[in-house]
């Protein structure tokens, strides 16, 4: 923040001595003799700076409050002194001041925002001053203006429409599914293989290793991974197969324990549930990967599930699992890690396939209805794409602007 | 000096896993896991509980009890209550209380990401895909002169988006037209994965180079 003091142009007159007086008399004589055009061009820096014009201050629209937007018109000198001129913004809580500097913006700018952090409902006054070097223009004032928060972001009405449309489609198909309407879901190899993979571990008498990603519970992919864990746990409870779930986040551990416990209860095998098979290792990405590598090599699980959000540890885990000959089912929506899972795992759930696993495995009508509703949402998007390309290519109007999210 | 030797020992210990599992790797793994778990515990305390909970509640109480009225930072008290509810798991008889904060996190996460993903993955993608594919004026295609200009980049983006979306249709059997379209979509996905694979492998190489630089430079002094 620049703290240059505002004010009128600053001049520094020197006290004139007798020698200076003589030189001034000579200069005056020359001026009268040669005319005013003879004066040397000293640059426009000695002109007083004109102030910016038409300053307006208004509450910033579509925000949660505490913010004010200022706009002004630049003086012509803005262009002349581009790069050296700047504008200082000052704020006061009363019309008479004192005005405190809050920001400085470069030449060419004709707007600025103050906040967030201003108190909603309180009036503010603003001044803008043009600055160049030590010189400053007279200030221009605007106000009072009162910051307020808005309940609705008018720049996101398109998102509201999309949410309502998608929700309506999902609710409609859920209701239809509840009334017994049949919903077709195509075969997904990775999910079809879940029972086969658990069966393999059961036959071999070895455990199943389940890794629900390496991120926390506030990630939707982790939630999707845990929903798959619920289905896997029901099957392992039925077949009495050992299941081990090492996690890298404490909250995920709690959620996994709840999920597995519920699955064992639902299968009528609560006595088989062992809480200590679901445990926390470390939050550290590569510390966790090192521990999983060691576990895979030593315990040699027959089946490994890796569903959730993974980053650089994905290939380390998948390659080690591959090296011990385990059947691996992976799933993530992290595009940069999918190639590694595709290369090193037997089955990979790509992107949205991970999110539909819960519905696919449970075949529960409400979840299937939700899935169908989402598919219809995609159909709407496909139609919009086709229509949009046509309209845009024909140049009828800017169809793409309907999808701008501010 | 001791730090460099220790770092080199741990690096070689972890690398020894490339040969096979061995006691040195087990030792390094245990140190890595133990130290990192402890580090994260301390880190989370000083980065979250202390500044976001303790300091905010302290400042809020100072503000309120010195006559400043309601302070929005009291909202952090809600987080403290949720955290305490989570600890109820330690008491089996009231352990069910810990499900409430879990439900809160899961529900709020789902609601929050619904909007975020709709904006970033749907609205923005649609906006960037809808571009004029043809324009007036002469164009060319592999040396052939066309009476109009075609935006080939836009065309491939549109085809990739459209067919990729068809692949992620789950309530339609992938046969006939839908099957062919989905196959083109999976082709686009695989090309993308291939490019991403190569790019990421290169970034992993830089990690390896970093370790080699440490071993041969900082430790052995062979690289200046």
Image (cartoon, coloured by chain):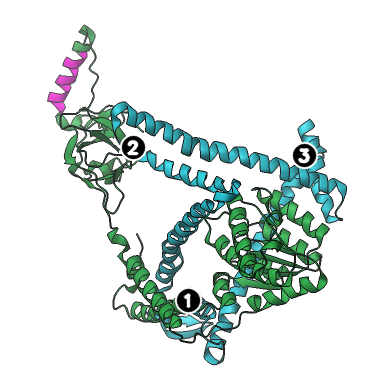
Chain colours: A green, B cyan
Q: Label 2, on which residue?
A: B71
For marks 2 and 1, give the CA distance.
Answer: 43 Å
Considering every residue shown, the one lying at the far front of the view is B93
Q: Residues within 10 Å of mark 3 (few under 14, many from 20)?
A: some
Chain letter behind tag 1: A
Considering every residue shown, the one lying at the far left of the view is A32
Quadrant assignment, res B128: bottom left
Q: Position of residue B52 (x, y in %)?
A: 47, 39
Asked whether the residues under the numbered discs 3 and 2 touch, taking CB atoms below 8 Å apart as contact, a structural biologist would say: no
Q: Are marks 2 and 1 on the same chain?
A: no
Task: Specify the principal SS of the magenta part.
Answer: helix
Q: Label 1, on which residue?
A: A366
Q: Taking A89 as reference, is A185 left or right?
A: right
Q: Taking B21 as reference, is A104 left or right?
A: left
Magenta stretch holds residue A169: no
Mark 2 element type: loop
Mark 1 element type: helix
């Amino acid at each position: 923040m620049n703290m240059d003091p505002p004010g009128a142009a600053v001049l520094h007159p020197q006290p004139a001595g007798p020698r200076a007086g003589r030189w001034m008399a000579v200069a005056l004589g020359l001026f009268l003799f040669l005319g005013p055009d003879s004066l040397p061009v000293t640059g426009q820096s000695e002109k007083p700076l004109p102030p910016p014009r038409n300053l307006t201050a208004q509450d910033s629209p579509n925000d949660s409050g505490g913010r004010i937007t200022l706009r002004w018109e630049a003086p012509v000198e803005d262009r002349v002194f581009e790069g050296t001129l700047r504008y200082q913004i000052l704020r006061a809580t009363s019309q008479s001041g004192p005005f405190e500097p809050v920001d400085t913006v470069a030449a060419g700018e004709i707007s600025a925002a103050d906040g967030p952090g201003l108190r909603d409902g309180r009036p503010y006054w603003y001044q803008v001053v043009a600055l160049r070097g030590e010189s400053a223009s007279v200030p221009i004032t605007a106000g009072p203006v009162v910051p307020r928060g808005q309940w609705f972001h008018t720049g996101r009405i398109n998102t509201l429409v999309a949410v309502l449309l998608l929700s309506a489609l999902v609710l409609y198909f859920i209701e239809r599914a509840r009334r017994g309407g049949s919903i077709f879901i195509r075969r997904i190899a990775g999910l079809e293989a879940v029972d086969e993979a658990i069966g393999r571990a059961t036959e071999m008498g070895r455990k199943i290793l389940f890794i629900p990603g390496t991120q926390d519970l506030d990630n939707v992919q982790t939630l999707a991974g845990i929903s798959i864990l619920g289905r896997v746990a029901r099957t392992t409870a039925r077949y009495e197969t050992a299941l081990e779930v090492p996690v890298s986040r404490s909250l995920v551990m709690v959620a996994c324990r709840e999920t597995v416990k519920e699955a064992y209860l639902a299968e009528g095998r609560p006595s088989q549930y062992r809480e200590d098979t679901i445990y926390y290792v470390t939050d550290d990405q590569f510390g966790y990967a090192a521990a999983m590598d060691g576990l895979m090599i030593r315990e040699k699980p027959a089946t490994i599930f890796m569903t959730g959000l993974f980053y650089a540890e994905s290939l380390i885990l998948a390659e080690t699992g591959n090296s011990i000959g385990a059947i691996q089912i992976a799933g993530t929506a992290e595009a940069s890690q999918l190639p590694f899972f595709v290369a090193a795992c037997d089955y990979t759930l790509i992107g949205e396939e991970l999110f539909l696993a819960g519905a696919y495995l449970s075949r529960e009508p409400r979840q299937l209805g939700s899935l169908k509703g989402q598919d219809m949402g995609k159909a709407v998007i496909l139609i919009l794409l086709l229509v949009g390309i046509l309209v845009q290519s024909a140049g009828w109007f800017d169809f793409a602007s309907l999808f701008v999210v501010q | 000096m001791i730090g460099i030797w220790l770092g080199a020992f741990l690096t070689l210990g972890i690398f020894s896993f490339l040969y096979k599992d061995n006691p040195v790797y087990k030792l390094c793994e245990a140190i890595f896991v133990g130290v990192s778990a402890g580090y994260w515990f301390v880190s989370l305390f000083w980065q979250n509980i202390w500044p976001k909970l303790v300091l905010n509640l302290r400042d809020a109480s100072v503000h309120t009890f010195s006559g400043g009225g309601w302070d929005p930072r009291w909202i952090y008290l809600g987080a403290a209550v949720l955290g305490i509810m989570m600890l109820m798991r330690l008491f089996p008889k009231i352990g069910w209380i810990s499900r409430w904060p879990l439900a809160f996190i899961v529900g709020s996460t789902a609601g929050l990401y619904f909007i975020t993903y709709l904006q970033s993955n749907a609205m923005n993608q649609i906006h960037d895909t809808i571009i004029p594919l043809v324009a007036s004026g002469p164009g060319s295609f592999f040396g052939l002169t066309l009476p109009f200009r075609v935006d080939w980049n836009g065309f491939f983006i549109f085809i990739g988006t459209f067919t990729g979306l068809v692949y992620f249709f789950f309530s339609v059997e992938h046969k006939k037209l839908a099957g062919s379209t989905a196959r083109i979509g999976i082709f686009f996905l695989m090309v993308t994965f291939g490019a991403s694979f190569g790019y990421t492998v290169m970034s992993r190489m830089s990690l390896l180079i970093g370790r080699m630089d440490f071993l041969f430079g900082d430790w052995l002094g062979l690289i200046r």
